Image: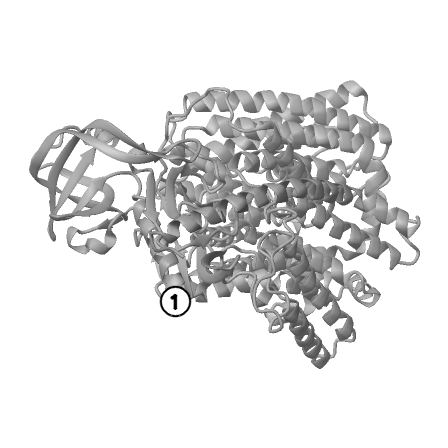
Amino acid sequence: MLPLSDILIWSLAGVLFGSLISWIPGFHIFNIMALLVAVFGVGELMPVQAFPFFAIGAIVAYAYVSAISSVYFSVADESAVFLLFPTQRYLLLGRGHEAVLLYLIGAVAGTLILVIGALFIFPKVLPPIYQATSPYITYFLTAIVLFMFMSEWPKEGDRGKTPFQRLWMAWRQILGGLLVFLLSGILGFIVMNTNLLPTTSAYTRLTPMFIGFFGMSWVLLNILSNPPMLEQVPDDRIESSPYNIAKASFGGALGGTIAAVYPIITGGMGALIAGHMTSQRGDDAFIISQGVNRVIYYVGAFTLLFLPNLRLTRGAAAWLVSSIYTPKSYSEYLAAVGVILLSAGISFVFTYYISKFLARGFNIVHIRKLSYFVAITLVIISYVLTGPMGIVVLLVSTAIGMMAAAFNTRRSYCLGGLILPVLISMTGHTGEVMHLLGLG
Amino acid sequence: MRGFTHYISGLAAATFFPALVADLRMGILIPVIAAAAAYFPDFVDFKFGKFFSRRDYEIDPAPWDDKKHYAPKLVKVAELNEKNRYQFFAVQGKVSEIVERGEDTLVFKMVDENGNVKTVEKPYKSIIFKLTDETGTITVEAFGEDYEFFEEEFGEIAFGKEMLVFGYVDVDDDGIKLVVSDAPHPQGIAETIAKAIEEAYEKGETIVKIHNIRLPGDVYRRFFIHLDPPKREVRVEMGPIVTPGGVAIGGEVPDYRRVGIAKVSVPFIKTYPKPTRVDSFSGPEIAFRKAEFKGKTVVKDRFLPWHHGFSHSLTMGIIIGIVVFAFFKLIGYAHATELALAAMIGQWLHVFEDQLGFMGSNLLPPITKDVIPGFKLGESGSGLTNFSTAWLMIAFMIWNFNRFTDPRPIPIADWKLLLLLAWPSIIGFAIAIVKSFRLRKEISQLMDYYTNLEAFEEMEEVGGI
């Protein structure tokens, strides 16, 4: 194991790195880490044993600081053609800073729950539960996907003149979601199972697809909707209650844990399950639970890599890091828990002051200009990581991401890009689908 | 219960059958059908039944703009008529005449914190002018707090000024007019519901669809519908603007157009002791049905009449079991019997879980004809009962996976493992049961109030019962 001073230095470097890029819309820490490895490599400037600690610092920072981009840089225009996220509504009401504060409350709660869980619960409880349930992961995954479709709430249909008109208005949204899932799935299947992208991009082949689904489509919506830059209130004031905070923390922790432990199940899917299980309602509760969920999902999943009696590789960052160095001892696990606490404290301060700064000068640089800059950067990242075909994948996935918004369905249907090919592979049908698509 | 609670119950039901668990272990995912069957009743109701439900009265306080999908709808003057009374619209036009500027004394009714209605008089500034577009001319009236807001927004209203006016339509001796406001007037909703109750007393049943009020920015104007049987009135109260998450973000309406009250000439009772709240997602349907109550003929309300009907019956569970068995036997699935039983049990669990709440279900049609009231353990949205149930189902799944695997991944006694896994649910249910006693007492007191027979007797003199 590295000396403690080195662990501290490298984890602080990770926090700094993560904080610097995580506030930019469309940037995901996993992509940037992949870019870092692809361009600079690990082992020359940074010792391989330090990479997990650098990564954990960066991921904690991302879990905190990315609140800035989801609150301030995902603004919607007043026409509200599409449904808004609670954070967007807060921003439209000039309460962006309040949304960040609510998120931070959740993130701190998530960090504490994670640290307590990592120290006292995970090592004892997780291995036997995981062993008993892991053969049935495909069952859970299929069940969650089916539930996503069955539970899609029709947002329109009430005002049709005839029953059939009402039915069609409701079902075009549901069918739109299904279409987005299938198209994403086909794209994901092609990306994962063909030589469309160069073999040198083994660890980053999904990156342009995810940038398109969730990053580029978001940035393009910012450009197209040309949102108003409203005056924000920078006061440290929130409207919530201890009961809501406790309930949201519990729900967020539940969803985050499910997503962290089981493969392919993402934070959003975990939140959907936990939200139903704990019957959550209220924008404040939603934002707080998002904070808890994201910390436990991103950081918790990565922490499992350190747990010696389980050593699960969950998430792109864990796969990337484990390909270079996998921590092996309990002392490394304990050091990781300490790094989480330290990184969380620093990230909290970063997020708070960035939010305060942005709230004061929110209308100085128009988000449209920032979005152009980000769009170009995302194209460059995709090109560097995956070459010219990566740009093609980026374009297609961006179109699919935009379709989800146009149909007013869940953006999470784009996860079909990951879920469908994995499901096909887990059930042993990859060959048949390849044949069906004329690919083999 | 929430959808996922039902769904996970179906997932758990399948794990009680060793043959299905063995299939799952081999990657055969067919048993997920049991979860779909458990969710099926809500799926049918909310994705199909809802849209085919009859609507005798359709109340749309604020019709949507066709392009923007929110209110107020931008209309031409000629499109408005008396049928639009109290509805919320926007009209673009030019001021063609200032009819009157002055001060009025407004007289209006408002409800205090204790629910008592009182009459209030207030002096207010007002303006009346004519607004003209290419299709015609309409009188526009602004008074009180609305006038102040209106002047703040547009400056002084003068001849020739081009403006977009939004407000509710009203009718007087001179015809229709537009009253400047930021919400529809609740009187229209109250009057239509009252009319529907009276018609139900004559005809047997009426169904009312009430639309919600969606405003720009994906926010909603909340309103409450109070059915007050002892006073024999329908009271509708306009509330604040809220987000889809239910957070109020201001926009309270002035007192003088906050409440709409309509008297009902026939006796009615309310089966659920809380006002109906309408805000985000979609508005409710309420059926009013003629029924016997303590020897009197009354009208009884039923929330979402298309919900908890045949789809939520044990009979439907049997049908689902038969269909699943027939289909999977036909395609040669080796464990069609187990799957059919799991699907039936999943659907039955849904019915049972809903029976724990308020609405109840028609349990065994055609033997039973009407809804059998729920056990009132908690509301359908209760986090406590939802979590306790869902957690219990997760516990069952882990327990079953463990006992049907050889060697057992968790090598402890079955009862001990189940207890270790299920204790959060046991505690949750215990709390819910204790709370339900309090809730039942409260409901019983409120029902006494709502079904105050003395009030019914008094009304006999004026032609009630």
Seen at 14% across and 33% down, the residue is B127
- Chain ID, mark 1: B
- Which of the two residues, A370 or B365, is positioned nearer the viewer here? B365
Instruction: Specify whether A124 is left or right of B445.
Output: right
Most extreme residue toward the front, as rendered? B461
Question: Could you say where residue B296 lies in the image, as x and y percent from the top left?
Answer: 48, 59
Q: How many marks?
A: 1
Name the image quarter holding the C terminus of chain B: bottom left
Q: Is residue A260 visible?
A: no
Instruction: Specify whether A37 is left or right of B285.
Output: right
- Which of the two residues, A206 or B44, is positioned nearer the viewer here? B44
**Residue at the spot of label 1:** B203
- Which of the two residues, B111 or B36, is positioned nearer the viewer here? B111
- Which of the two residues, A84 or B295, is positioned nearer the viewer here? B295
Seen at 13% across and 32% down, the residue is B157
Label 1 CA crowd tier, 10 Å (few <14, some 14–19, many 20+): few
